[in-house]
Amino acid sequence: MGYTMLKTRPGEARQDGLHLEDAALSFLRDRCEGLRFSREKTETEQKTGQYQGGSLRRGEIPYNMQMDIDRLCLENALRRFLRSGRKEDAFDVYFCYLEMFVGDYQKTRRVIELLSEFEANGSKLLMKHRDHYVHSVYVFALGLAIYQTNSIYRKTYQDLYQIPEDAPAACHFLQFWGLTALFHDIGYPFELPFEQVASYFEVSGDDRKQRPYVAYQAVDPFVKIPRAVAKQLAVLCGGAVYETIDELFAGLLAEKFSKTYLFTEAQMLQILRDKPARPNRFGHFMDHAYFSAAVLFKKLFCELSCSLQKEHLDALSAILTHNSLYKFSIAYYKEAGNLPLKASLHPLAYLLMLCDELQCWDRTAYGRNSKRELHPMDCRFDFQGNQIHAVYLYDKRESGKVDAYKAAYSAWREQEPNDADQKVYKLWKERKPKLKAFDGMYEMDKNSVPHFQADIERIVDLSDIRLHVSAELAENKRQQNYLSDSTFLSLYNFAVVLNARWDSSDWKKAREAGQEETFLLAENNLQRFSNAFQELSLEYKLSNINQAKAFSRYMSEIGCFYTDRPVGFDLLEDFTTDELELIGKLEHQRWLQEHCDMGWTYGEPDRAQRELVRQHKDMIPGWNGTVVSEELAVKNYLRLDKAEQDKDKEPMLCMLSLLRMFDGLRIYKLR
């Protein structure tokens, strides 16, 4: 199956569709046929003879073709991320989703960038903390894979939302699962200060109740719902009038869960009001899920004035319950008689809880204690037969740590007391060796189920969708990271300015005069550049973003790196001719691969037809492969005239100025 309107597309070999990457990508390619298509715009195109879709410029291609290209952008972004696991590639997935389903990334960027940067910097002060930014994109991919391969879950979702046809149901799922998964942890900036204070006062063996804690006061203005939004909610919620987010959330949870878990709307309202202000009621923990749901509601419906649908409310209530609220204030999942959540009650909440628990691999450890623990570097999934087989892979280089733990655990088991003295038994239990997270997958309960799996089975009902968990040691094959270090808060800004070079001869004059920063910082220029960037299609926006991201690799290739830290290396002020030539060839390889992945081929059509037929004269003549080797790229680069070769070099000259401006970085020579 090809993309509906995209005649030329990548021919990468397909796998069996039952593993994480292939299942998630197959969902986007095979199930989401017609994603965001518009019959109305197609009819307008037929009547007027003018295209409604945009590429480099508006009106160059049919509208539905643009929607297909956007879908391919998301597929390629997710593929890049699943193969690298890098934060910069996670950024692309967020960017695609926001552009496709929410709107202008410029208006929503702070929420995403704040989570990434605040977490990376603030979490170093904590005892226990791991990444939630990259984690959320893995959760997103895992949910797509489960939907793609599990007919039981698909039917549950389609039945609840009454969408019998497969393609419309999949497109519906993509939109609202994406909202649920990608934004479920954006409230962590509220939890991090709370944990920082707790870590500061932590004493080995003490109880949290004995430490000072942070609480949030004066939240009334934050949770108040504007009158216009309240009117929309009343239409969706059977006439119910909600004045605050807490009241709305209490009503939603009571509707979904109260009959099964026996609580009242009033009881839930009190719990939600106490969440930010009285963490002592909840074991002295702050619930980031409450803030994630609240922040997302405020951003989408109070600031951006997005149109509310009932499914948006389901996404919000799923986010709200994915952490401690469901476990300890609704289901009391560790108590006898616990009822694990059934997918039919709330498919989005069910899938989020399941994927959130399963996704514990390849997460950067920030907390001081977390760095000493042993976490899986990868996970090998098999989704055959409506089941989930998850083999968590641990770095083989850590085998000494694993062997020591296993020996200690075996010795501890042999010392299990035979008598019924509870004090003796308690002391023995307290001496149990630990090696988080490996121990949860190694130790078995009385039913020979790993503790990690058993805990998940107490949260969500897996009687129909069976789960099997195991652990292995394996070689670390993760792609290399580069020495260059940046917060990349300004990645979007880099892309905006890199694009602006094409329409601004003034940029070259400013560079020749040594006034690049003055030119780029001029308010009217930045606004003009931003407006021009917004006119681009998603494909070309991503192209500029990926061009900026590639800079770290190019620096590594010429023996340089950039950082905002003071280091004892010589500064690089400019590139040599040889360095720039090498960078140009590497950039051409990246450009070729990017265009190949997006279905472009060689051809020399008229400029007006180029975007429609997706052919470019700088592609490789007579080649129809899928992977552009360095040798092939260099050969093609050398056939280009100087003006075309310079297009691969000039962006990197621009990056020298951009790094200084937006991130305060400097480039250093390793030798």
Image (spheres, rainbow, N blue to C red):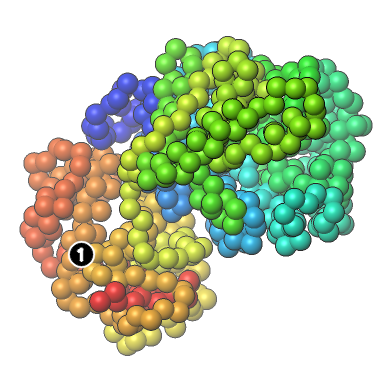
The reply to whether residue 161 is visible in this rendering is: no
Nearest the eye: 468 or 259:
468
Q: Label 1 is placed on what type of residue?
A: Gly
Across and down, in percent, residue 571 comes to: 34, 82
User: In the current view of this chain or complex, which residue is farthest to the bottom?
Assistant: 513
Residue at image x 39%, y 36%?
Answer: 473
Residue at image x 36%, y 64%?
Answer: 483
Quarter the C terminus occupies: bottom left
Element marked by disc 1: helix
Examine the image and state in which quarter residue 308 appears.
Answer: top right
**157 sits left or right of 611 in the view:** right
**496 sits left or right of 442 in the view:** left
Nearest the eye: 261 or 58:
261
Across and down, in percent, residue 47 comes to: 40, 32
Q: In the rendered image, which residue does mark 1 sit on?
A: 584
Nearest the eye: 180 or 533:
180
**442 sits left or right of 612 in the view:** right
